[in-house]
Image (tube, grey):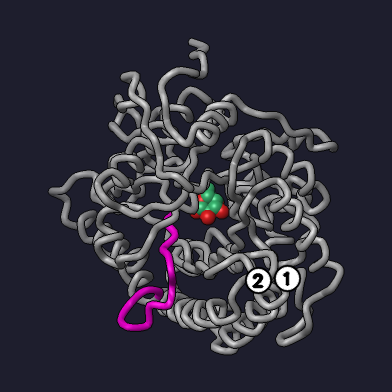
Amino acid sequence: MSHPAHNGQMLKFPDGFLWGTATAPTQIEGHIYNEWTDFVALDGRTCHPACDSYHRYEEDIEWMRKLGVNSYRVGIEWSRLQSAAYAPLDEKEMARYVDQLDRLRAAGIEPMVVLHHFSNPSWIYSSGGWLADSTIAAFVDYAGKLARALRDKVRIWNTFNEPDTYASCGYLIGHFPPRRKGRLLAYRRIIRNMGRAHHRVCGMLREIGSSFGAVEVGFSKNWTFYEAYQSHLPWDVLLAAFTHSHLNTLVMENFLGGEKTTSTFLGINYYGRIRFRNFEPLVPAYGFTCDHLAKLGVHCDDMLERHPDGLELALKSLQAQCDLPIYLTEHGSASTDEVFRERDLKENLSALHRAISGGVDVRGFYYWSLLDNFEWQFGYTKKFGLVAVDFDHEALPRKMKPLGEIYAKVCRENALSSGSHIPDPS
Ligand code: FCB
């Protein structure tokens, strides 16, 4: 697929646009005690020590400086900060996060802080997690304490990352802890409870405010298109419609519906599409090889089908639906083929630019991810980083990847331009 930047045209983004990277505590920090600690991924490894960013956040900020990003979507891990519901925040752990936030600001990098990214303290997890109504109040208490403590450090908050992924992987398909399958009522209950918590937290954070100006707060929806591979097979059409209604529509209703809209923005994590053939999702994440899928006309990275045109469509229809500014809080690809990844990035940035030119108010883009990291059920085999981490080496050395250089140019120029291509090794 070609895009304007390939034809020598420069695609400028709006002034003040945020160019960032994103990570999550369980995926990079290591030394973490939550429901993932004992979870053994498909590669036989655990989330410890991941990238050891718990100790190396200073070095990681240096990598961001080299990338030239002006924002970082960073998670704060609840399990580090409270030992029980309503407990005070742990001072030592707080000091570490404060130091990280101060260093980010000193580097000219605006933090967007994520409160919940697929993990909970063990005392929440063992008392029913998000199935229990009591979790809502405990989370609201935690978020309030955190926002008051960070009033002078943070202005942009992201409440929940991909509630649909969290609840479906844990309770419908059994890929995340607690590995339950087919629990539709549990899934719906979790979405409802997280939605209720989201509304309360949004109102509260806006009231607490920030010394940097008006607080921005929203959740991040994983926007995936679910379609039938062959539109004449009614069972796949039905499955796609059912999945869309539960994973997309239900979540939007619970988080943004009715008059309860308390968010100031909508976060979108966009990777692409899942098409079903005879009930099977045609994506590598479900065991198909990329080569096999390519023969079916399904073009994938190591996880999902790519669908850059869908990004423009999604942004237009979501803005029309909820009328909020949007941050693209995640996009990225996993592959060891950097030429493929460059093409994917440029196609998606072109689609993003088309959406913005067509009137969609998108305020920032966060590449997933800063570092190669612990990719949940898959362990360390999916390479999403702009910066490589060598997990076979005890020192976990980092190294800029070719895609990192390409992204740095985008950040520097606030534009997607032609020139500077990763040389194709073939
Ligand atoms: C998203 C998650 C993120 C990472 C990327 C690849 O769904 O939010 O943690 O796993 O996918």
Q: Amino acid at mark 1?
A: Ser
Image position, residue 95 (x, y; %): 82, 65
Image position, residue 94 (x, y; %): 79, 68
Q: Residue at x 68, y 59 (%)?
A: 39
CA–CA distance in space, label 2 to label 1: 6 Å
Residue 294 or residue 63, whichever sits in front = 63
Q: Vertically, is 275 above or below 214?
A: above
Q: Vertically, is 96 above or below 411?
A: below
Q: Residue at x 41, y 63 (%)?
A: 266
Q: Secondary structure at mark 1?
A: helix
Q: Vertically, is 86 above or below 166?
A: below
Residue 213 or residue 99, whichever sits in front = 213
Say which mark, if any, is on residue 43: none
Say which mark, if any, is on residue 79: 1
Q: Secondary structure at mark 2?
A: loop
Residue 278 or residue 176, whichever sits in front = 176
Q: Magenta segment, which residues?
A: 255-268
The image quadrant that residue 37 belongs to is bottom right
- In the rendered image, residue 267 lying in the magenta stretch gets the answer yes
Mark yes or no: residue 95 visible: yes
Q: Are marks 2 and 1 in contact (CB under 8 Å)?
A: yes
- Left or right for 243, reference 219: left
Residue 12 or residue 117, whichever sits in front = 12
The residue under label 2 is 120
Quarter in which the N terminus is drawn: top left
Q: Vertically, is 246 above or below 376?
A: below
Q: Amino acid at mark 2?
A: Asn
Q: Is tag 2's residue or tag 1's residue first in the polypeptide sequence? A: 1
* Disc 2 packing (10 Å; few <14; some 14–19; many ≥20): many
- In the rendered image, residue 289 lying in the magenta stretch gets the answer no
